[in-house]
Amino acid sequence: QREDGMVDVSATLTPEAWAVWEAIFAKFAAPGMCNPDDPEPCTSGTPSQAQIDNDHRSLVQRQHDAMVAAGRIALMSGELGKLNGLPVSVIIRTTLQDLESRAGVGVTGGGTVVPIGEVIRMAGHANHYLAVFDRATGSALDLFRTKRVASAAQRIMLIARDGGCTKPGCTVGAYGCQGHHVEADFAKGGNTNVDELGLACGPDNRSVDNNGGWTTRMNERCEVEWIPPPSLDTGQARINYYHRPERLLHPPDEPEPQGHNDTEAEIESAGSAQGNPRGDETNGPRPTDDAGEPGGPAPPGDQAA
């Protein structure tokens, strides 16, 4: 993918493959068809004369748009089956901040960076999922399962959290990954809980062997660490940031000073200590309530602020 987001493609097709695309292009790359500049692009039937006259795209541009239309028709048909437990579909992860600012990007399960404007346009006719993570620990909230295979919802959470294979140095995107039991294999008592799973490509998943081989563990921020066997341990990285480079830009949360108008931070700190079993480790002990302080004392432990 180039700096401007475009992807260069070249191909050498067999006669059969070109015969297929020849027919598709004859239909969908005709003037007036599948024109993204039209308020209501014609994707079936025959375009109107006005759509044909207002189509100023080159043949190459029309063929590009025809490939997009043909791909979307295939995805929406429901005939492509499933990929690692999910229906074959485009999965894009982004953040609420990027959506609100209209200035960020989304990343597909294959690692393609998509401008936020196109993410919003594609999301206009798609199913939406909201993945919520604990800010202090990175834990996914309320997604657990007692079967060996991760559910569709759990896979979506793993894609949102890991982005791709978690083994350091591996560039395989989420589309090519399996749900790996990080702490213990399911056959050995491991749980299929989203906070005990991580994405791993097939070869790396099979390389984990607790009998002298590679092992994995989940650290306190819900990042999968890969520990090599002693014979291969050269002090290399344990965490793969290839698919989530933005994590390198955000240092661990530091406690903010308690000011006159800092009630929001105070409430968040109290909520983390109550709702997170590791809250005391993350935020430290709760300060003693003082009725004389601005805002008054904190609410009782069994009530919400």
Image (cartoon, rainbow, N blue to C red):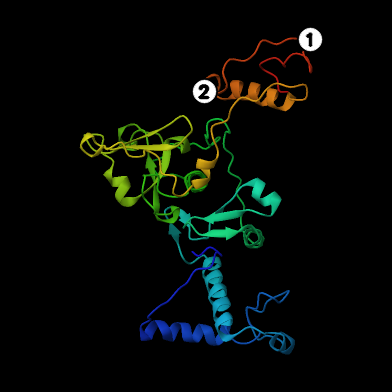
Across and down, in percent, residue 218 comes to 41, 33
Position of residue 66 relative to residue 140, above or below, is below
- Identify which amino acid the numbered label 1 is placed on: Gly
Measured from the top left, where is residue 49 in percent x and y? 72, 90
Residue at 44 percent across and 52 percent down: it is 174
User: Could you tell me the amino acid type at mark 2?
Assistant: Arg
Mark in front: 1 vs 2 = 1
The spot of residue 249 in percent (x, y) is 54, 41
**Image check: 156 left or right of 183?**
right
User: Which residue corresponds to mark 1?
Assistant: 292
Q: Residue at x 58, y 81 (%)?
A: 62
Q: Name the disc covering residue 151, or none.
A: none
Dot 2 alpha-carbon crowd within 10 angstroms: few under 14, some 14 to 19, many 20 or more: some
Per the image, label 1 sits on a secondary structure element best described as: loop
Relative placement, left or right, of 230 versus 259 is left
> In the rendered image of this protein, does residue 67 appear above or below residue 213?
below
Q: Quadrant of residue 65?
A: bottom right
**Could you tell me which residue is drawn at 74 percent across and 22 percent down?**
259
Q: Nearer the viewer, residue 153 or 207?
A: 207
Q: Is residue 129 left or right of residue 38?
A: left
Residue 114 spot, x, y in % from top left: 57, 60
Q: CA distance from mark 1 to mark 2?
A: 29 Å
Say which of 142 and 8 sits in front.
8
Q: Quadrant of the C terminus?
A: top right
Quadrant housing residue 268: top right
The residue that mark 2 highlights is: 278
- The crowding category of the residue bearing disc 1, from other C-alpha atoms within 10 Å (few below 14, some 14 to 19, many at least 20), is few
Q: Earlier in the sequence, mark 1 or mark 2?
A: 2
Nearer the observer, 165 or 41: 165
> Could you say whether the residue bearing mark 2 is in a helix, strand or loop?
loop
